[in-house]
Amino acid sequence: MVITGTEFKVEDQLKSKQMNIPISIKLAIRNVFRNKIRTLITLAAIAFGSVSIIIAGGFFEDTFLQMREAVIHSHLGHIQIHSKGYSDHGASAPFDYLIEDPENVTEKLLSIDHVKMVTPRISFSGMISTGDNTVAVFCQGVQPEGELILNKIDAVKDATPGLSIEEGENLSKGGQFDLILGKGLAKTLGAKPGDSLVLLTNTVGGSLNAFDMTVKGIFFTASKEFDDRTVRLPIEIAQKLIRTQNVQTLVVLLDKTENTEKVKDEILRIIQKDTLSLELKTWKQLADFYNKTVDLYGRQFFILKLIITIIVVLSIFNTINMAIWERTREIGTIMAMGYKKNDILRLFIAEGFILGFLGGAIGIGVGAGLAWVISFLGIPMPPPPGATVGWTAFIKIVPDILVSSMVLSVAASLVSSFYPAFKASNLNITDALRHY
Amino acid sequence: MAGVVVKTEKVSRVFYLGKTKVQALDDINIEINEGEFLAIAGPSGSGKTTLLNLIGCIDKPSSGSIKIDGEEVSTLSSNRLADIRLAKLSFIFQTFNLIPVLSAFENVEYPLLKTVRNRGERSDRARASLESVGLEKYMHHRPDELSGGQRQRVAIARALVTEPRIILADEPTANLDQKTGEDVLNIMKRINEDSNTLFIFSTHDLKVMQMASRIIRITDGKIVEHDYFDRKDNIKKNGNCDGDYRNRVQGRRSTEE
Amino acid sequence: MKKNTLSLAVFFVCMLFPWAAFSTEEITAQKILEYADEIRSPQAAYRVTARVISKKPGKEDKIAVYEIWMKGKDKTIIKTLEPAIDKGTSLLMLRYDLWAFLQNISKPLRISLQQRLFGEAANGDIARANFSGDYAPVLKDTITIKGREFYALELTAKDERVTYHKVNLWVMKDTYYPLKGEFYAFSGKLLKTCYYTNYEKLLDQIRPTRLVLDNPLVDGQKTIIDYSNMTLDDFPDRVFTKNYLKKLKY
């Protein structure tokens, strides 16, 4: 059989300038697996980097979640309502900023979607006296039933409640002259459940007042700082002690933390509509330590991602570079056929992309799988700074992190393969053909 | 003789190795016609490969003019040269230069990917090309599953599939044993005769020169001889002729008679 | 100095009639302080009524009335007479220790001199009368205001339990009437300013009968202490004990 023909004119032959996608991908894939061991090691490096990001990121996310829920459910709640001006001036004159008509406000709050519960509080500084010793304390007058609901953490598996009783019992409904002490505070005072203490403070009017109280129990929370200085007593007793009918804070608990912004907007709307003299703060605005921790970990995570990306870039660069070195003669041959610089460029970038994509996909698979297994087992953790008890860590599988680890792998692969591919496309054909 | 395909005028090529200037080609003036089976002969370092590369548009002359089908190529951009190579030129290499991850069929198909969109058409042409070198049974073998001779035949099929104006072969039999080399050469000769495709070899292989319709001899970058042999084996002499060469020519003629 | 122009004016009116003269010996910071103390309160055992008005801008004035028993520098009892709800709350000071006795609590409770008693008045402001035992004085300067000369003393606490770490006290020359005091915490923060005014004869001496305690942070927030009914009294020592505290009659 003989090929005849000048049927195909030059113009027709130059009709399609692009490579057909499926075949070039086929070629790129086969090239990638040309040297199986090298490719496998490169994929392993990429996947390892990917898995590290997924596990570390998932660990941090879990830490944030647990911290957040702990701080919300021990004392912050999701949203706190105060009298207007409290956050600016309340520190120096707390009793000047009390919420009048708290029942009315509570009713309005309960009518909002996603609001699970509203509980009142009044806080003030006082002293506990054991006769010859007086210790300055932070007093919280609370509604025991409301606080119990607040303390339950639903969002985290097997979580310690926000506030737990170590010895004795928690406050109960009704206005008894009971108080519960934070763990550190109880230790300082040498107090046990059943002991009598005197709680002393200045009233809203400025005069001295004191009550004989009984220690009902000793509590602990996630915050050591809180436990070292806080006393909780029934709000009715607190009100009698400082001589007021009003409350200072209304703590709002939601069904899910994710609804905080939504409910915040709704409350602001109501405050404006009914011209109430109130202000609100979300847990995020109040959780200073949490915010600082998220910021710190966020930076660390960023550095980690950066380091891993650099390593991935270097390993892909090395792999592609070596491949080009080995295929220099082949590149010359292709260009002699009439393939252009751009075609060569695209070929090697495609190979880099495939490496990054495959590596990233393996990373996601292994990372997600590993995260699931670790989460199933749980990691026992020691108490973090400022806290009193240890906790169980899990690895959250965060879709954002999975996506970003893939994006990072692919981006890294494109970036790193660009320079070698560019150099390959600019090879001198005759030199390339002479290459070993 | 049919039309002039390649015309060079006062072509020279200079290389710089560091500060040293090397004159690879000097004042090359040739015309090559359609259908020739041309050998550019000379010892190593004579410049024969350089000349082949210039004609093949994978290198540019330092001075002078090269025209292919009347088009001046010495001043074209590398992209434009790539277009010309795609349309008109094919190469066959001493080291075969097949793509190892592709099968014989896919290797032959490869140059068509750029120009033929229709998959069926590509497939037909590739298959036909392989058949013409007798390797249709080995279509799906990878190069590492083929012998040297088979690989070169795949390379020939690849060179043919684009229906080029010129096929340039740089010492195509140098890596083959004598018998295989002969077979490969015969295939190329047959193709040249059947399709009138211009073949240009750079070689120092006697067998190639014996089959050539014309020999251009190069030494130290300069052309020293032109010898023509037309198809009816008439000797036409052009320029000087050294003794050895004349004997060979005469020897051949004597066996024919 | 410009804030309390009224007090200043009253002060100067009183200054037109010096009622006591002191010897013209070489004067030391310590002597200045001691004379100033003698002006402010008798150095023998006495009792006095203090009416304290707490003023806050935009709010109603709050009033408390105390009866103060003083024996020497280190024994004081403060009985709360008004408001009615606080009546019966007693304070006992022995040296730098302070106890509060509330009617509903069985035993006395330890509190501190720095703690607020009422308004801007700290317990120590009312309970401890003399500066000279508590503070080491240094005469910083002599300044002239409206033609009269004043000693500017800087007082540093001798004991860490004393109410304030540092006091700047301005005392008039020759008469030793205290004009103004600035009270500082250990951190250097100005806690309050006190103006000694309404100089009147109280128990055979011209004394400042009104103290105006000014909060430096809030304009218009101040506490006024008016002293009256100052009489000498002979209290037995056993009165100034924790056990006696619950027996105090109201």
Image (spheres, coloured by chain):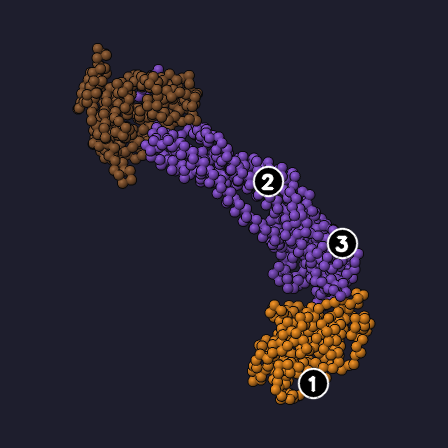
Q: Which chain is purple?
A: A
Look at mark 1 in the image and give the residue it sits on.
Answer: C205
Chain containing the residue with disc 2: A
Alpha carbon distance from label 2 to label 1:
83 Å
User: Residue at coordinates 17% horizontally, 24% vertically from top-left?
Assistant: B239
Give how far across and how far down residue B120 sits, in percent: 41, 21
- How packed mark 2 is, by other alpha carbons closer than 10 Å (few <14, some 14-19, many 20 or more), is many
**Where is residue B69, by image quadrant?**
top left
Q: Is residue A206 above or below residue B44?
A: below
Q: Nearer the viewer, residue A58 or A203?
A: A58
Q: Quadrant of the C terminus of chain A?
A: top left
Look at mark 2 in the image and give the residue it sits on.
Answer: A397
| The hue in which chain B appears in the rendered picture of the protein | brown
Give how far across and how far down residue B186 sits, in percent: 31, 17
Say what amino acid the circle numbered 3 marks: Gly
Q: Quadrant of the N terminus of chain A?
A: top left
Q: Which chain is orange?
A: C
Q: Element under label 3? A: strand
Residue extending furthest toward the front: B244
Say what amino acid the circle numbered 2 marks: Ile
Task: In the rendered structure, find residue A217 and report the number of the disc placed on it.
Answer: 3
- How packed mark 1 is, by other alpha carbons closer than 10 Å (few <14, some 14-19, many 20 or more), is some
| Of the two numbered discs 2 and 1 in the rendering, the one whose residue sits closer to the viewer | 2
User: Residue at coordinates 65% horizontally, 57% vertically from top-left?
Assistant: A82
**Where is residue C136, by image quadrant?**
bottom right
Q: Element under label 1? A: loop
